[in-house]
Image (cartoon, rainbow, N blue to C red):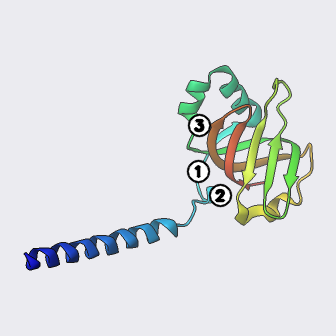
């Protein structure tokens, strides 16, 4: 009986060690950088219209994928730790295309101005009233 208990304890310790190692590796896994990936090219206006017209179809095409979005900047929200670029979508009733900039690329936003035409890459996370893009990077 004592021998079985020792075997169970050893197996439990080995399983805990393996689980801890896997958790550590996953926690410290580097974030994907959109600037190094090929993106689906789309204008901010076309992207917004796709979600506004048929959200289900747009989710299938864009959500979870890297997008390369071009358009005119409507507004820039910039603090020390967060930056967002909001694209101009003239015919939009309420929303817009909002790009949250990756923390590693915050300095790229400082030189942007409203009405400037730019290209950004980022991961599409879906549509609420705005098309939300996360981990964005200013390409040009």
Could you tell me which secondary element the residue under label 3 belongs to?
Answer: helix
Q: Nearer the viewer, mark 3 or mark 2?
A: 3
* The quarter of the displayed image where residue 16 is located: bottom left
Q: Are marks 3 and 2 in contact (CB under 8 Å)?
A: no
Q: Which residue is mark 1?
A: 38
Q: Residue at x 86, y 28 (%)?
A: 90
Q: Position of residue 125 (x, y in %)?
A: 62, 42
53 in relation to 129, above or below: above
Could you tell me which secondary element the residue under label 1 belongs to?
Answer: loop
Q: Residue at x 9, y 79 (%)?
A: 3
Q: Which residue is mark 2?
A: 35
Q: Nearer the viewer, residue 20 or 82?
A: 20
Q: Which mark is residue 61?
A: none
* The quarter of the displayed image where residue 24 is located: bottom left
Q: Give the distance between the C-alpha atoms of the residues marked 2 and 1, in whole angstroms.
A: 8 Å
Could you tell me which secondary element the residue under label 2 belongs to?
Answer: helix
């Amino acid at each position: 009986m004592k021998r079985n208990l020792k075997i169970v304890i050893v197996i439990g310790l080995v399983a805990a060690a393996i689980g801890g190692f896997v958790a550590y590796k996953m926690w410290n896994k580097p974030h994907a950088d959109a600037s190094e990936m090929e993106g689906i090219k789309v204008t901010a206006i076309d992207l917004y219209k796709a979600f506004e017209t048929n959200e289900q179809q747009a989710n299938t095409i864009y959500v979870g994928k890297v997008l390369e979005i071009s358009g005119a900047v409507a507004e820039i929200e910039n603090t020390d730790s967060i930056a967002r670029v909001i694209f101009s979508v003239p015919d939009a009733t309420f929303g817009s295309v909002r790009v949250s900039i990756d923390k590693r690329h915050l300095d790229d936003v400082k030189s942007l101005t409203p009405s400037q035409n730019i290209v950004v890459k980022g991961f599409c996370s879906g549509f609420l009233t705005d098309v939300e893009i996360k981990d964005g990077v200013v390409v040009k």
